[in-house]
Image (cartoon, rainbow, N blue to C red):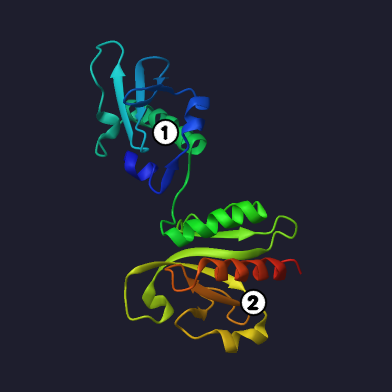
Amino acid sequence: MEIDEIFENRKIIPERLLSFGFVRQNDGYHYAAPLLDGRFQMSVIISEQGKVYTEVIDTVSEYAYVLHRVAEAEGEFVGRVRDEYESVLAAINNACFERDVFKSSMAKKVISHVRETYGDELEFLWNRFPENAVFRRQDTEKWYAALLRIPKRKLGIDDDELIEIIDLRIISEEIPSLIDNKKYFPGYHMNKKHWFTICLDGSVPAEEIFCRIEESYRLAKK
């Protein structure tokens, strides 16, 4: 697996790098780990922007080893090197990075608002759909919001551009007067009698979205 694939849609948390064992230097954060009981030395450098670079050195020959990054390279030995190499990167990924799927300024405002107001973090529940996530109440464990990236066409808009959306709960009686297919859409991938969708493109102001989130949070208590 390529490095960019492992760290795709991930954001660096610098303070966690230091706790993990990285050392900050002029060109970024440095970390070293032995592979195969010291037969190889793996070096990891992470830039301030979160770009990850690696090198594996054969401690006997002191030459760089690269077969672990060649997809066509097979065999038990290279497989062991590759497994340990990827395990180190996976540990760094899990400990020092966080999900960064939603890029729009409105989505980031929503995530920050929910974190500060309700203390909740996005939960990415589906491996098959890594760009879908939910917020849920801690007391009832019910979802009150879902963030997704979908083509606009899924909402009935004649455009294949990807857009970030939020699904929220609503009292069913309010749906007919709310849905206008401009600012408010039928709940995408949700029960359309109880959920609706907002595009996080600025068509609905942040404060209005926050009020809708508050109502959805309240409805998730039942």
Residue 120: in sight, yes or no? Answer: no
Q: Earlier in the sequence, mark 1 or mark 2?
A: 1
Identify the amino acid type marked 1.
Leu
* Disc 1 to disc 2, C-alpha distance: 42 Å
Residue shown at the point (56%, 74%) measured from the top left: 190
Quadrant of the rendered image containing residue 90: top left
Q: Nearer the viewer, residue 67 or 186?
A: 186
Look at discs 1 and 2 and give the one toward the viewer.
2
Question: Dot 2, how many residues are within 10 Å of its Cα: few (below 14), some (14-19), or many (20+)?
Answer: many
Q: Nearer the viewer, residue 173 or 35?
A: 173
Placement of the C terminus among the 4 image quadrants: bottom right
Residue 181: in sight, yes or no? Answer: yes
Placement of the N terminus among the 4 image quadrants: top left
- Where residue 134 is drawn, which disc sits there? none
Q: Percent from the top left, x then y, of residue 110?
A: 53, 60
Residue shown at the point (44%, 24%) measured from the top left: 22
Q: Percent from the top left, x then y, of residue 67?
A: 26, 29
Q: Nearer the viewer, residue 106 or 38?
A: 106
Q: Percent from the top left, x then y, of residue 145?
A: 59, 65
Identify the amino acid type marked 2.
Ile
Mark 1 — residue?
89
> Is label 1 in contact with label 2 (beta carbons under 8 Å)?
no
Residue shown at the point (58%, 80%) measured from the top left: 192
Mark 2 — residue?
170
Q: Percent from the top left, x then y, of residue 140?
A: 74, 60
Q: Secondary structure at mark 2?
A: loop
Residue shown at the point (35%, 38%) measured from the top left: 49
